[in-house]
Amino acid sequence: MSRLVVLPAEADFAGWREKARALLQARVRPEETVWTVAGRGEGGDLFAERADVAVAAASSGTISVPRAFVDMAKFVICHNAADRFALLYRILWRLLDDKHLMEIAADADVQRAEALAKAVRRDKHKMTAFVRFREAVTEDGSVWIAWFEPEHHIVEATAPFFVRRFANMKWSILTPGTSAHWDGEELVFTTGSVRADAPSADALEDYWRVYFASIFNPARLNTAAMQREMPKKYWKNMPEAGLIPDLVRGATQRTNAMLLNPPPPPRVAAQDRRAVMQRSQQQVESPDGDPLSWRNFDAQLTGCRRCPLWRNATQAVPGTGPRSADVMLVGEQPGDQEDLQGEPFVGPAGKLLDRALEAAGLPRGAIYLTNAVKHFKFEPRGKRRLHKKPNGSEIDVCRWWLASEIKLVQPKLIVALGATAASSLLQRPVKISAERGLPIALPEGAQALLTVHPSYLLRLPDPEVAELERRRFVHDLKRARSLANDLGAEFKAA
């Protein structure tokens, strides 16, 4: 006959542990138990015997289990799965014969329990992140009330976090299942509430929305990641959520505006501030007063201090070629030889590029060549300087230079060599293998075409593979030549 085990509450770990210990000592097998919670009704097995009566005499004694099981069980108990109590008792029963069961990641019961525990941990994190208190004024003063809809039975386990965080406030967190209340001294739990019991707004929300909008960074927007970490089901209880659609729609425009504006100068000591201001004034001013003239561009690039890369580089390396070219090639950054000579694509990768351009029928002298990052980033290795890929912030800061060059040159076609150049140009992560050789329309009116960087070809160890990839690279450049012709490009040497 099955034993019916009734727990007093949904997330009562202490109660489950007491019942489970008694069942184990009475050698009641997992398949002989039916678990339920008081208030649900004692269904499941009409012929089940009340286990709390049958095994009461065997409820003393100690049973040793791995700490990993206890830690996991405290989360699993909070899940809303109806079989969680039986699952934990089955694992506990098996641990009597196999103390290492929790270490077997492929075990079906362990996998299931870990999945339940993970879901509860995530739900607890969401509660701490997305609960929003609103002020309600009562005869006894202000009380802060929040409405939240957890997926699992986590209120009692998560409420102590809010006690620590808001110890000086009187607050209530209302949920459909269990509500938590803190009066400044005691934490009390009551039955569930309805959403109408919580305030719909308060006077501080306008300030919160202004703050949220001001810290929103459009350049770091990743809509998929945002909705994964902040699912839409929570938005209805968050006052700032109403701003999100408009912020997302305007992100691209705001990012472009940010990129076209130079970043603020770095902070300097008070005694150096006057010298920095004088140097900046000399760099920016010109007779014609045009901040986007080539004269100003060259002067400002020479003294660029927008990121720390200038400290170790020999010089900033500008683009070269006709300054009204119809075709522009963008690489990643200067290499060792480019840093020393002050001209892009003069090292080994540049020599390979020259041969490929010639094979594709693209005259180098008629193309404007530049890099996404203007200073050489490297790692010293003895007497050598080894190329080191620029990071995201360095690419972002240097994007202003590339955007200015594009505005000054006004090319019809821009060929991005490698992922760094492509992401700087398109202002998003790029996988070259997925978009290689495909024309892409740019906001400036030009077309873009992506391919690999010639330095990639130099790093291939297999000669046959290297030759195959070199032919693909030449083919990409031929596509660029064909696309440029379709756009009406002219190839006039500088």
Image (cartoon, rainbow, N blue to C red):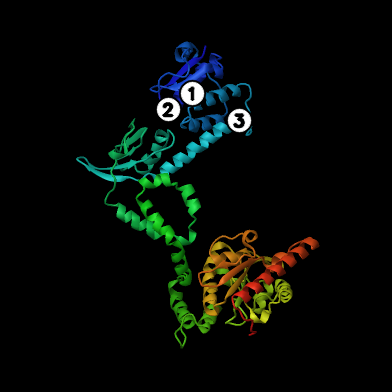
Q: Please tell me whether residue 464 is drawn above or below residue 489 in the rendered image.
A: above
**Quick one: which residue is furthest to the front in this view?**
486
Q: Amino acid at mark 2?
A: Glu
Binning the other alpha carbons within 10 Å of mark 2 as few (below 14), some (14 to 19) or many (20 upward) gives many
**Quick one: which residue is furthest to the right in this view?**
463
Q: Amino acid at mark 3?
A: Ala
Find residue 468 and name its label. none
Q: Earlier in the sequence, mark 1 or mark 3?
A: 1
Between disc 1 and disc 3, the foreground one is: 3
Q: Please tell me whether residue 85 is drawn above or below residue 447 in the rendered image.
A: above
| Element class at badge 3 | helix
Q: Amino acid at mark 1?
A: Arg
Can I make out residue 384 in this image? no
319 vs 478, left or right, is: left
Quarter of the figure with residue 140: top left
Find residue 108 and name its label. 3
Residue drawn at point x = 80 percent, y = 63 percent: 463
Viewer-side residue, 44 vs 274: 44
Q: Are marks 1 and 3 in contact (CB under 8 Å)?
A: no
Q: CA distance from mark 3 to mark 2?
A: 24 Å
Q: Are marks 3 and 2 in contact (CB under 8 Å)?
A: no
From the top left corner, tell me how far across and down residue 93 is, in percent: 57, 21
Residue drawn at point x = 55 percent, y = 19 percent: 30
210 vs 3, left or right, is: left
* Residue at image mark 1: 17
Between disc 2 and disc 1, the foreground one is: 2
Binning the other alpha carbons within 10 Å of mark 3 as few (below 14), some (14 to 19) or many (20 upward) gives few
From the top left corner, tell me how far across and down residue 477 is, in percent: 68, 71
**Quick one: which residue is furthest to the bottom in this view?**
287
Viewer-side residue, 96 vs 130: 130
Find residue 10 and name its label. 2
